[in-house]
Amino acid sequence: MATALETNVLEAQARKPGTKNEARRVRRDGKIPAVVYGAGKDSLSISVDPRVVTRILNSETGHNTIFDLALDGEKTKAMIVDWQYEPIKGRLLHIDLKRIALDKLLRVSVPIFLKGEAAGVKQEGGILEQMLREVEVECLPLDIPSHIDVDVSHLTFGKVLRVSDLPHSEKLKFLTDPNQPVAHVTSVKEEVVVTPEAAAAEAAAVPAEPEVIKKGKQETEEEGAEAAAEKPEKAEKKEKK
């Protein structure tokens, strides 16, 4: 399991902060704007080579990679904490960097890799579903794993792999809820295909009017008829008087 420390060196140049025109100029020159902060020092606006940043992000350790940031003749351990892509062409637009002290604990998210073929898939015909793909841990920078591998070959129907079941180490403190489900084997859902005939039959089916409503209408009509019959009788009595 590779750690997040790599031998990459990211060269940086200071730039003017804040203006969009300056950011456009940086991009025209083949660089991208960036900000570096942390380790008790002031934040600095810098520009960096997007090709080196892309290589770091696509490496095995990804955004958890710790590398040397070279600025003004000095090198500082740093890592990428945020990045933005142009939505259409997918080009890097901006990154945020954080200075790293190797003796200070960090909180990072580490990918979870499922290894092996689950028994519920191999023997029972189910499908393996992974609900959690990253776990948050706290550790020293040199102890950040590139990923956490977990064997799922024992996983059958009815069993749930949880964070508490992941391989633990004294160097890692798991911050994610230990009861959080990571993966399980579920049944293959059959797709129900509705034929045109069935759709037409369903559309033609008109639900019967509830009996209570019908009864209410009948009672109303009968009461109206009785009231109409009573009126002549009352008129007749008045004439006799």
Image (cartoon, rainbow, N blue to C red):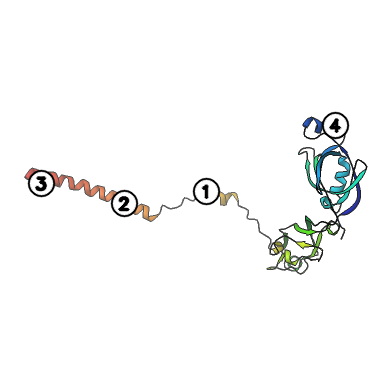
Front in this rendered view, residue 165 or 95: 95
Residue under numbered circle 2: 218
| Mark whose residue sits in front, 4 or 2 | 4
- Left or right relative to 158: residue 166: right
Answer few, some or many: residues within 10 Å of disc 1's Cα (few below 14, many 20 plus, some between 14 and 19): few
| Mark whose residue sits in front, 4 or 1 | 4
CA separation, marks 1 and 2?
29 Å
- Work out whether mark 2 precedes mark 3 in sequence or the reverse, and give the earlier one: 2
- Work out whether mark 4 precedes mark 2 in sequence or the reverse, and give the earlier one: 4
Front in this rendered view, residue 187 or 179: 179
CA separation, marks 4 and 3?
105 Å
Which label belongs to residue 203? 1
- Work out whether mark 3 precedes mark 1 in sequence or the reverse, and give the earlier one: 1
Secondary element under disc 3, as helix, strand or loop, is helix
Q: Residue at x 13, y 43 (%)?
A: 235
User: Is residue 66 visible in this depiction of the protein?
Assistant: yes
| Mark whose residue sits in front, 1 or 2 | 2
CA separation, marks 4 and 2?
83 Å
Q: Residue at x 81, y 31 (%)?
A: 22
Front in this rendered view, residue 75 or 83: 75
Answer few, some or many: residues within 10 Å of disc 4's Cα (few below 14, many 20 plus, some between 14 and 19): few
Which label belongs to residue 237? 3
Which label belongs to residue 173? none
Q: Amino acid at mark 4?
A: Arg
Quadrant location of the N terminus? bottom right
Q: Amino acid at mark 1?
A: Ala
Which label belongs to residue 28? 4
Quadrant location of the C terminus? top left
Secondary element under disc 1, as helix, strand or loop, is helix
